[in-house]
Image: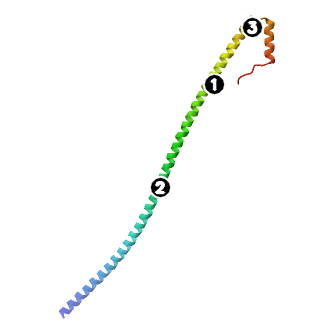
Amino acid sequence: AVVSTQSGHYGRGISSELKSYGNNLSTKEEQLQALTTEVGDTKSRISQISEEIKERSDNLEERKKEIEETNKELSKIKMERDEVQSKRKELWRQDSNFEQSLNTSKEQLDEAERQLRSTVSKAFNNGIDAKKKKVPTATLR
């Protein structure tokens, strides 16, 4: 009877252990299934992120090309601006030279007129003055 009690006790213990192992196995299988699902989700997310990285990389390359083209255009425009500024400065110099030449010519004309007036008669000078009043001198401007 002692043996049967012990074997009954051992039987219940083994049964209990088997049940515990069964529960542990079910829990482990559920964990495995959850982890497998999580791995699949993570792989899917990695794939999405990789695609986003590729798109952003391509977009970045396009932007770099656009910036490069814009910089080339900017350089070209700056060169054109510099050429125009240089031409404008040259035209200002020419204008200044023409203005100076005009002033010198007017001064020479005035001096020549003064010398002429001193050498001719008063009646002749009055005739010149009358002619100047009727026909005003044209200006270059």
Residue beneath the point at 19% across and 94% down:
1
Q: Identify the disc placed on residue 58.
A: 2
Q: Quadrant of residue 36?
A: bottom left
Residue 45 left/right relative to 12: right
Q: Looking at the picture, does residue 87 appear above or below residue 39?
A: above
Residue 20 left/right relative to 104: left
Give the farthest residue toward the left.
2
Q: Quadrant of residue 126?
A: top right
Instruction: Give the amino acid type for the residue marked by disc 1 in the picture.
Output: Asp
Image position, residue 37 (x, y; %): 40, 72
Q: Identify the disc placed on residue 95.
A: 1
Q: Identify the disc placed on residue 117.
A: 3
Instruction: Give the amino acid type for the residue marked by disc 2 in the picture.
Output: Asp
Image position, residue 118 (x, y; %): 73, 5
Q: Looking at the picture, does residue 80 appear above or below residue 43?
A: above
Instruction: Give the amino acid type for the residue marked by disc 3 in the picture.
Output: Arg
The Cα–Cα distance between marks 2 and 1, rounded to whole angstroms, is: 55 Å
